């Protein structure tokens, strides 16, 4: 086993007691002290980044003792990739949902910096353009120095150590009094079963890390598979390029819901309802019944209708039962009923798998740390989102406590309120 090593950070910052190589210590000089972190947040997307701000700026935890572990170079990188690739123009969530403190912060930022016409804004009342949301988030990250908290690496295991949790990472070992699991779902791509029968490269998932819609090569006939926001927006964005024929292939008609959960779950009163339900199987039913998976906003539905009306986009309904790679590199999609479709650019936009995030290393931690789970495999946590001594969760991992919006930006804010009740120590 590698010798125990101490890794430093910026002056006045924290150092890590670790084993193995340290890929990217926080910039700045080294400081030779051995101290446990107060908090290590695993995952630096919207949730991990927002909660690092809550802990350091709102709650007053010493920033030198908080770190965010994430494999990506940039905060919110998966968010930016996924939203860019589907050509998303406006957020689906209300203006109160962002990573700053003041609920009105994004509203005021949009008022002062938004460049959209009043007609455009009227149609998207109460929601921010993606560019405005991202610029606002960049400002929060800069002002609160959240980039300084980031450590680039991936968690691979959790163990209990004296006074805290040891986190094995591909960048060495980090110890913290508390660990917050903020991994999200965006690494768990969902594919239709029939894709398994195709060679790698025949189909591209628009949510895959590294996928770049702008780099998709030429096509004659592109097919986008899926019936929710990502599929509809991707198809419309590609159709607008006029580079070739585009077909949106969904199982049925688009289902319209302006938000992907019932509105009651966006505010703290929603989750309070769950607290009265001691049966976690019934909580799971409540969580699922508050969601509108596979739905689109009225704007996106209208954009699909417009593109179809203008003859730029085909919208076809059907359930693919098999797919065959053809010798010329194209793919034939076959249906139980109806004619097959052949495509030379097959894009999968069926979202993310809702299994418990984390995979094997979290499975092992559940066993070894005795972390309680419901029958669905998801964490049973207390009101402070503590899963087991020193292990906290947010995002989808907290959905049996925070409800169906746990994985949304609203869920990050709900989690922030819960963590804030703990105070700085
Ligand atoms: C296209 C799209 C549009 C959306 N629009 C909205 C919207 O308008 N409003 C809304 O409220 N919600 C929206 N959502 C839902 C949700 O808010 C976003 O998916 C959001 O990015 C989730 O943030 P997150 O931090 O939970 O997850 P992520 O963005 O996935 O971040 C998690 C991070 O954890 C990292 N990670 C994973 N495993 C490890 C590990 N072992 N060690 C270290 N790091 C790890 C990942 O690499 C990633 O960087 C949208 C989602 C998508 C895909």
Image (spheres, grey):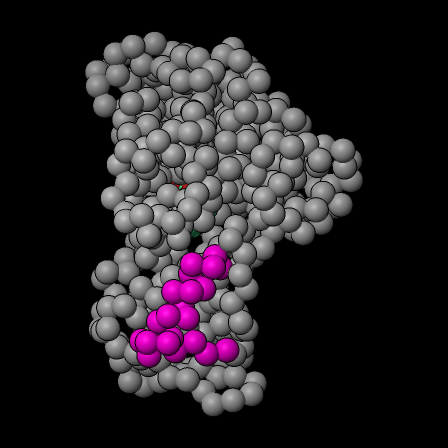
Q: Compared with residue 321, is residue 416 higher up or lower down, i.e. above or below?
A: above
Residue 117 on image: x %, y %:
28, 49
Judge whether 8 appears above or below 314 on screen. above
Residue at image location 37% in from the left, 70% down from the top: 306
Q: Magenta residues? A: 296-317
Q: Say whether residue 303 is left or right of residue 298.
A: left
Q: Nearer the viewer, residue 180 or 412?
A: 412
Res. 162 image quadrant: top right
Whether 118 is drawn above or below 106: the answer is below
> Going 51% across and 53% down the picture, which residue do you hit?
258
For ligand 1, which image quadrant applies? top left
- Whether residue 398 is visible: no
Check residue 304 for magenta coloring.
Answer: yes
State yes or no: residue 372 in magenta. no
Residue, x 76% and y 33% (percent of image)? 276
Place of residue 164 in the rendered image (x, y in percent of width and height, measured from the top left)? 53, 19
Residue 246 located left or right of residue 232 = left
Q: Position of residue 302 (x, y in %)?
A: 42, 65
What residue appears at the point 46 percent right and 41 percent down from the top-left corner? 94
Question: Is 296 situated above or below 267?
Answer: below
């Amino acid at each position: 086993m590698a010798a125990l090593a101490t890794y430093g950070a910026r002056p006045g910052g924290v150092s890590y007691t670790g084993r193995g190589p340290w890929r990217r210590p926080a910039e700045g000089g080294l400081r030779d002290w051995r101290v446990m972190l107060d908090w290590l947040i695993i995952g630096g997307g919207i949730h991990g980044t927002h909660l690092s701000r809550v802990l350091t700026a709102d709650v007053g935890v010493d920033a030198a003792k908080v770190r965010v572990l994430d494999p990506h170079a940039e905060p919110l990188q998966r968010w930016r990739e996924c939203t860019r690739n589907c050509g998303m123009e406006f957020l689906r969530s209300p203006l109160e949902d962002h990573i700053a403190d003041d609920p009105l912060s994004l509203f005021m930022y949009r008022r002062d910096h938004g460049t959209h016409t009043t007609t455009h804004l009227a149609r998207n009342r109460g929601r921010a353009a993606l560019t405005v949301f991202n610029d606002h988030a960049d400002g929060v990250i800069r002002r609160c120095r959240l980039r300084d908290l980031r450590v680039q690496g991936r968690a691979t295991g959790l163990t209990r150590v004296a006074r805290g949790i040891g986190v094995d990472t591909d960048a060495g070992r980090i110890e913290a009094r508390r660990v917050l699991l903020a991994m999200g779902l965006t690494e768990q791509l969902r594919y239709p079963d029939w894709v398994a029968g195709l060679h790698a490269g025949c189909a591209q998932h628009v949510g895959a890390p590294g996928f770049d819609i702008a780099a998709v090569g030429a096509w004659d006939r592109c097919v986008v598979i899926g019936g929710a926001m990502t599929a509809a927006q991707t198809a419309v964005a590609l159709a607008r390029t006029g580079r070739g024929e585009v077909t949106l292939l969904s199982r049925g008609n688009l289902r319209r819901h302006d938000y992907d959960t019932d509105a009651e779950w966006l505010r703290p009163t929603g989750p309070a309802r769950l607290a009265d339900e001691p049966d976690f199987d019934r909580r799971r039913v409540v969580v699922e019944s508050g969601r509108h998976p596979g739905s689109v906003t009225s704007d996106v539905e209208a954009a699909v209708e417009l593109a179809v009306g203008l003859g730029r986009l085909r919208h076809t309904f059907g359930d693919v039962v098999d797919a065959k790679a053809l010798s010329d590199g194209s793919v034939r999609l076959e249906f139980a009923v109806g004619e097959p479709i052949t495509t030379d650019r097959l894009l999968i936009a069926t979202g993310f798998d809702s299994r418990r995030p984390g995979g094997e290393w979290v499975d092992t931690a559940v066993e070894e740390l005795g972390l309680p789970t419901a029958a669905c495999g998801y964490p049973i946590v207390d009101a402070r989102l503590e899963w087991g001594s020193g292990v906290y969760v947010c995002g989808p991992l907290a959905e049996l406590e925070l409800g169906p919006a746990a994985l949304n930006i609203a869920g990050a804010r709900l989690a922030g309120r819960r963590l804030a009740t703990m105070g700085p120590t």
